Amino acid sequence: MARTVSTTCPYCGVGCGLILNVDDAGRIRWVDDDPANPSSVGMLCVKGRFGTSFVHHPDRLTTPLIRKDGGLKEAGWDEALNLVAERLSAHRGYFGSFASAKATNEDAFIQQKFVRLIMGTNNIDHCTRLCHSPSVEAMLQQLGSGATSNSYVDFEEASCVVVIGCDPGSNHPVIASRIRRAVDTRGTKLVVINPRRIELCDRASLFLQPRAGTDVALFNGVARAILDEGIEDREFIAARTEGFRDFLAAIQEATVDECAARCGVPAEDLRTAARLFARPPARAGQPAGLRPGSCLLWGMGITQHTQGTDNAHALLNLALLAGQLGRPGCGVSPLRGQNNVQGCGDAGCIPDSLPGYQPYDAPVFARFEDHWGGPLPRQPGIKATDMVERIATGDIRAMYIVGENPLLSEPNLRHATGLIRALDFLVVQDLFLHETAELADVVLPAASFAEKDGTFTNSERRVQRVRPAIAAVGASRPDWEIICDLARRMAPAAGVDPRQFGHATSAEVFAELARLTPQLRGLSHARLDTAGGIQWPCPEAGHPGTRFLYAESFPRGLARFTPVRQAAEADETPNPDYPIVLNTGRILYHWHGGTITRRVAGLMARVDTVPVAIHPADASVAGIAEGDEVVVLSRRGKMSGRAVLTGGVQPGNIFVPFVKLQDQAANFLTNNVYDEQSRIPEYKVCAVRVEKKRERASGPARRD
Amino acid sequence: MRLDGREVEPFGSLLDTILAAGIPLPHLCKDDALPVIGACRTCLVEADGRVVAACSTPATGVSECLTHTGRVTRIRRGVLELTRAMQSGPPSQTGGPCSAETAAALAAHGIEQARYLPRNAAYSDSSNTFFSFHQDACILCGRCTAACQDLQHIGAIGIAGRGLGARITAGTGGPLSASICTSCGSCVAACPTTALSPKE
């Protein structure tokens, strides 16, 4: 029967409402927008509208696979799960697991429960380590909560929106539309800070183009300008913050001009940015009596640096200095890249806290152990990037990777591939036999968003329903069901009651998550079905949810200024052999590493080779013309792509999206060095050389 | 107010009030999610004796509204016949979610064949990977351009030319693929004909 199903988009963290139109044959024919969805208000982007056909792709895994005689052979669920149970039991103490920010809250909750209760370790993490771990780290330290403080509607009610180190037009297109609407219809001021020109610059009042790796100098310069002009929010600083004196001392170490020289931005632009952010002119329709607000939105340009946490601190200091928190139309928003990266963390898939970011302390452990009927590990787990690195030291010998493809997403892929190969035992659970799955000992076929029942939590903390629209593909099953099945097989030997994993429905799983997680306690599938998506914190059934945080106080009481100083710009800086700085990021028509979007014909038709954006001056020196095939080399590897000449990147810089196309990917080049606190890799800066690809002597050169 | 002899509570536009009362009325250029355009003139009704477009007339201030008098039905039928004449080609079978609205309005007014000579509207653009544009089905209602400009705030498409020469264009008249179009598909979702239709 043809029917329509209301669900939530599986791509970025905006969390748009999708209405899937499914035909008689059970295939998605058309994806409609959902005007009733408060996060997307009737909008979609190309990926949500035209990019869901991957669920029907013939590459979908339809049966478990087991490695036999060197190859992956089809197997039944019993055989595969018994093997996994036996081998994982033998690796207790040397085990780590990646959860998936693409799976549901229910999947994530069951997975961390399995890792903690059955495997007895906190070695569980997910891709937040690679995207916003510095933001979360800095926000937890300074504010006491790691989530976005406001809602998308605040971008439209702000008088100034500052977009830093992200390209919403490519990765969060519906957010970009809401920002454009604010600028076009309300006169909202837009400030873009990015080392390369992005599309939103067309609407910007001010575009700052700093040198890569100088964000702290830039933000400290803006802070100094705010203080020089006396436009800081003294009342807010006195009533709501601590540590201002130390911060002031640190800021006074450098003048605006000195900071400007360090980051390569005109000093006057830093002063303009300071005024626009701290005291923006009121937008059209600003309610009388309400101070015009400013929003800070940021992405990986802040975080993916060896000083990523410092960058986030410097940025949050600005929000505190200007008092731009806790009112409508202001706040801090780390734009989340994946559909459920917020929820995966909320559900406890992080190594240093339990669901709901509850700390490892005695009362919390007591409550969880009481509910789960078994002892929980006390020692904080190993973070995702370190799990991979510590395969080399033998600390990690077996891994269970759900819905992630580290051999596309880790930096320095050749190095990472060597490590993953060295594992004694690897289980991969996913939709496709991707680069990591090809090396697995057991591959388990998982259900996609279109076959699943559950919830995603988007970037504005809105918990939304995911509903099954198509029949199961082959023998694939929802992640939580697979893990429950496995856990029941392992429970007796682990001294755990198998009924701890006896959930019959995903609604039951959510009920347990809500019971154990204070900010979700008021939610249930039934309530979300009736009311639509609700924003946490929602502590009780009658609570309407929370549009913005910190109206009265911060979770840690007072917010804390954290002085930071500009450190070395990057681990690796250009030299005569590698004279160019490589910056990585996203493009509109592909999704992250490309495991999904490579399997959507229309998206591949738009972009089928990796574009290498290079400044015309650098291109001319290297003899490169628009459309030429170029080779990019770093100390770690090389890749080829198609040259795009643009003044949008600065001379001496190139930009390459990290999607893998034609077996070419930027992560063969990137540097596996990490921010000390958050352990995020420095994807955003490494030194490379760009050459025009030499035509082979034999055979004609390929031209498209 | 009195609506077709019934006492109703006015709210929003006359069109809002009429549709809420369950009275069928074509409204080919009015999208739920978008501001009023007022281009298609297919929602003409009589309000206190005057013929007005229901979508752009506030309901408050009208004391009597009649939707199906002989006079207004005749005028609406005339408008729809002109609308039909804008479509020169045979209606294609596949379209977006609203693509049947025009055909349904024509059928409801008993219009099968075009009474006027069709205009010359042969432009088509299949350069976008995900959808195509065929002018021969386009009624120039403006919903697609409103979706592009007022919903997504992209402004990739607009209406260029006037009179018989008017058509939907991308940018300054080139193909969609060479414009700033981001392929979000909001135009396809809004189109009340098969002029903008998803590719298979």
Image (cartoon, coloured by chain):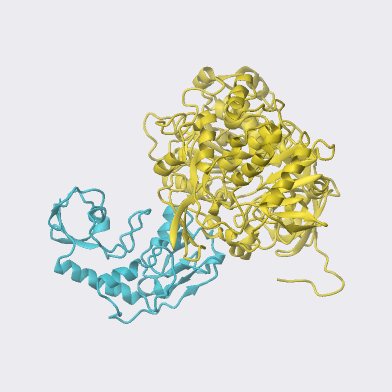
Give residue A102's position: percent from left, percent from top: 60, 47
Please state the total of marks drawn on the protein image: 0
Residue B14 falls in image quadrant: bottom left
**Which residue is at the far front?**
A492
User: Percent position (x, y) of residue A226?
Assistant: 57, 28
Q: In this rendering, would A507 be left or right of A642? A: left
Query: Chain A rendered in what hue?
Result: yellow
Q: Nearer the viewer, residue A266 or A597?
A: A597
Name the quarter where the N terminus of chain A is drawn: bottom left
| Figure quadrant of residue A360 | top right
> What is the residue that sits farthest to the bottom in this orientation?
B117
Give me the chain that's cyan: B
- Report if residue A156 is visible in the image: yes
Q: If the image is split into quadrants, where does the C terminus of chain A sit? A: bottom right
Residue A343, by quadrant, is top right
Residue A499 percent coordinates (x, y): 59, 36
Question: Is A156 on the left-hand or right-hand side of B107?
Answer: right
Q: Name the residue nearer the viewer: A371 or A269.
A: A371
Q: Is residue A461 visible?
A: no
Query: Could you say where residue A379 lies in the image, as x and y percent from the top left?
Result: 72, 26
Residue A680 vs residue A508: left or right?
right
Question: Residue A595, relative to residue B91: is it above or below?
Answer: above
